[in-house]
Image (cartoon, grey):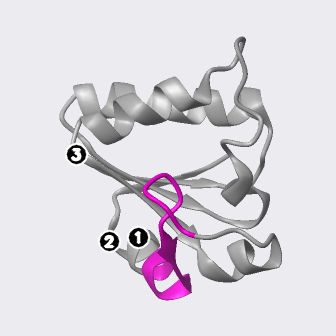
């Protein structure tokens, strides 16, 4: 299955759960793409001991099977630069995910 997950919040617990689900899907052989939108581009800002988003992201990226994309406009509005955990992308790529994936989840 091709799964797209759209993160549009910076809530630590929500994003932690989204990445836990993503890692489970990868372990089950699915393809997973995560698109960061709006406040979602700040998803790592609130990682903490209780909701260790960074640990989940590291597992996700180390698998080599998942991809993270981030809305460039949303990043510019928040004065953020792209990096490996928040790579610059755009609406064209989000549209492609929605069009091509079997399932799209939003968090």
Binning the other alpha carbons within 10 Å of mark 3 as few (below 14), some (14 to 19) or many (20 upward) gives: some
Q: Quadrant of residue 76?
A: bottom right
Q: Is 48 left, or right, of 55 in this rendering?
A: right
User: Which sits in the foreground, 38 or 83?
Assistant: 83
In the image shown, does 45 or 69 lie closer to the viewer? 45
Check whether the beta carbons of the residues at disc 3 and disc 2 lie within 8 A of each other. Answer: no
Magenta-colored span: 82-95
Q: Is residue 84 above or below residue 93?
A: above
Residue 45 appears left or right of 24: right
For residue 100, the mark is 2
How crowded is the residue under tag 1: few (<14 C-alpha within 10 Å), some, or many (20+)? many
Is label 2 in contact with label 1 (beta carbons under 8 Å)? yes
Q: Residues under labels 3 and 1: Cα distance? A: 15 Å
Disc 2 on helix, strand or loop?
helix
Q: Is residue 51 visible?
A: yes
Residue located 67% across and 65% down the image: 37
Residue positioned 78% across, 46% down in the render: 10
Point out the tag, 3 or 2, that comes first from the N-terminus: 3
Residue 61: % across, % down? 34, 41
Q: Is residue 59 magenta?
A: no
Q: Is residue 1 visible?
A: no
What's the residue at 72%, 12% (across, down)?
A: 50
Q: Residue at x 77, y 50 (%)?
A: 9
Q: Position of residue 75 (x, y in %)?
A: 70, 72
Q: How many marks?
A: 3
Q: CA distance from mark 3 to mark 2?
A: 17 Å
Q: Residues within 10 Å of mark 2 (few under 14, many from 20)?
A: few
Residue receiving disc 3 = 65
User: Which residue lies under the disc numbered 1?
Assistant: 97
């Amino acid at each position: 299955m091709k799964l797209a997950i759209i993160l549009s919040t910076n809530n630590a617990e929500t994003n932690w759960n989204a990445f836990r689900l993503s890692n489970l899907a990868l372990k089950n052989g699915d393809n997973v793409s995560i698109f960061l939108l709006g406040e979602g581009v700040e998803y790592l800002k609130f990682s903490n001991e209780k909701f260790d988003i960074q640990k989940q992201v590291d597992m996700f990226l180390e698998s080599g099977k998942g991809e993270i994309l981030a809305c460039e406009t949303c990043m510019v509005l928040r004065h953020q630069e792209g990096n490996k955990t928040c790579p610059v992308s755009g609406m064209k790529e989000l549209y492609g995910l929605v069009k091509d994936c079997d399932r799209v989840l939003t968090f």
